[in-house]
Image (tube, rainbow, N blue to C red):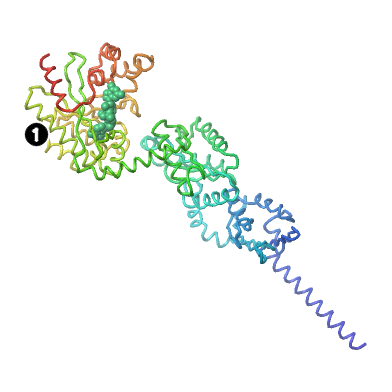
Amino acid sequence: MKDLTGQISTLESLNKDLIKASKLLRLISETSNVAYLCYSYEDNTIDTIANWDYFFDCKVETHEDLPKLYEYVEVKYVLPLKDALFVEKRGMKSATADFKMKDSRMWVEIETNVIYDEEGRPQDKIIRFTDVTKFNMQNDESNYITYCDPLTGLYNRNYFINLLVQFVCRSDYKDKTVSVMFLDLDDFRKLGDDIGIYGSDEYIKLFGQFLSGLSNENVLVSHFNADIFCIGIYDPCGERSVETIYNKISERLKEPFVLSDGKKVSLTLTVGVAEYPIAASDTLELINCAEIVMFRAKAGNKGSIKYFEKSILDDFLQNVTIENKLKEAVFSQNFMMYFQPQYKTSDNKLRGVEALIRWKDKSDKIIRPDVFIPIAEKNGAIVPIGSWVIEESIRIYAGWRKKYDYPMLVSLNVSAIQYKQKDFIDNLMSILNKYCISPDEIELEITETILIDDFKEITAKLKELRDIGIKISMDDFGTGYSSLSYLKGLPVDTLKIDKSFIDTVTTDENSRIITETIVYMVKKLGLESIAEGVETKEQYDFLKSIECDNIQGFYFGKPMPPEKIEKLIEESIAG
Ligand code: C2E
Ligand code: CA
Ligand code: CA
């Protein structure tokens, strides 16, 4: 009996200790910044323990309840959270993620561990939630910079790629597609010239904020740099999501963004779209592909969207081949110069010739200059090619000058990179001296795009050239940005009206009016006009009637080898 009483009192005191210990344990766990979620696959039940209420005020009782937690998380962290919560779907044992709670400063780290049986079936899953705000606050800035672009708050390129990899994995597993939209704002550099770097930054910020409103757990939005954005879409229903998103963006861009100084800015956007797994076999390739498609869209129609087609990739690869061939060809003399005559409308005599390069590759295939010149401009080969064009054209012209007393103009196409060469003017002058040609027999053609790159530097060079006596001609006028009033301040003597106007000048009222206005204004500004791409008598008659000064085009002569030009010179001399 005594024994029993003793045992009971020992048990009572043990029980007291136990209650005290468990109270203490509960107190500790309930006041700590940790919570656990334990899931049993066997009976699909969930226990939440420790300080659950600290994080969530919802009940989670079965596996199907887990998505309730997304509601508590900032939208951009939903995807990493989801991947960590459902780690067993990818056959993994553990996963971690950091996320930020919605409308709060709290950062939470979660760690998920899955226990599998011998046959690889998941048995139990434990998820630990820890408040890491204090720690993360210290690293807040560096964290932010690791994941986000500071200007727009959107994902940066690296983190975007990371998340896109997860989309791609998920689509492999579920047999779905992932689309990438590569977005590039049109004429953004020009905007920088107009409103300065702060203004254009503000525009990017506003546009980025608008785009961030399109993000959700299936749509990732990222700012790569400058005017380039990228959107990744986990797309269970094919291209339609791309279309919907594109329509939303286009709709928004119809209205200008208003900057803090009240300026209204409207830009257009060009978009390239590629889809995994049709266009590419991995994430980086997918982004590259969308970028290539975007470039193609830009070359055709700015402000448009283009979807991946195999031919676009083939063309691109062909260009890469051309680039390689170009490297071999630069010094192997496969180039030759052709010349296209330009005639004065006043007396139908030769005004001059435009020098146009021709390139036959090793297999005698002609590669068009508008295909290889842009590639040569990109890889720098344009510098030696351009020098060759200048010397060869002047050499040939000097031959004509020796033979005939008929001074004309030789128009040379010169790229921006050539102008930027320090010794460009010195080299040109020494060639002129070598062949005894006067600077006023040379005309350099520039395009408007040349001025966008480095307006001040290039206009300074152009002024210098003009002071020497060399003429400057604005090529492809009407296809770029320049307005006639803007021409007034530029060191330009001649203006070439682009072929696209001439093509429709006899059929389209607008082209007719624009051309007439340009010719009239050019005269008022004291410049000379040339119509390019004149192919028919009707076009010629019209241009003569509005007193366009000069004509160039197939109607009078295609680009031809130098010997043929000699015949034309003889005709002009004969009158
Ligand atoms: P561009 O400077 O606008 O040259 C005019 C182009 O229009 C030439 O094409 C010419 O053959 C073509 N053309 C002239 N009249 C007519 C016509 O009546 N109808 C049609 N359909 N076309 C006409 P090409 O020779 O193929 O040159 C294309 C472009 O390549 C040039 O455009 C120019 O931007 C560039 N390029 C050519 N040679 C050189 C060069 O030596 N250096 C540089 N930097 N670029 C060059
Ligand atoms: Ca030209
Ligand atoms: Ca042209």
- Which of the 4 image quadrants contains residue 556? top left
Q: In this orientation, does residue 39 appear?
A: yes
Q: Residue at x 11, y 19 (%)?
A: 570
Q: Nearer the viewer, residue 15 or 247?
A: 247
Image coordinates for residue 135, horizontal then vertical, percent = 55, 62
| Residue 497 seen | no
x then y, percent, for residue 356: 23, 30
Which of the two residues, 197 or 215, is positioned nearer the viewer here?
A: 215
Residue 357 percent location from the top left of the image:
23, 33
User: In this rendering, is residue 135 above or below 103?
Assistant: below
Residue at the far bottom in the pictured view: 2
> Count the marks: how many?
1
Residue reaching furthest to the front: 363
Please identify the quarter of the rendering in which residue 529 is found. top left
Look at the picture and state if 388 lies above or below 343: below
Q: Quadrant of the N terminus?
A: bottom right
Label 1 is placed on what type of residue? Tyr
SS for callout 1 = loop
The residue carrying mark 1 is 435
Residue 422 place in picture, x, y as percent: 20, 43
Split into 4 quadrants, where in the image is the C terminus? top left
Q: Is mark 1 within 8 Å of ligand 1?
A: no
Residue drawn at the location 21% of the way across and 42% of the way down: 384
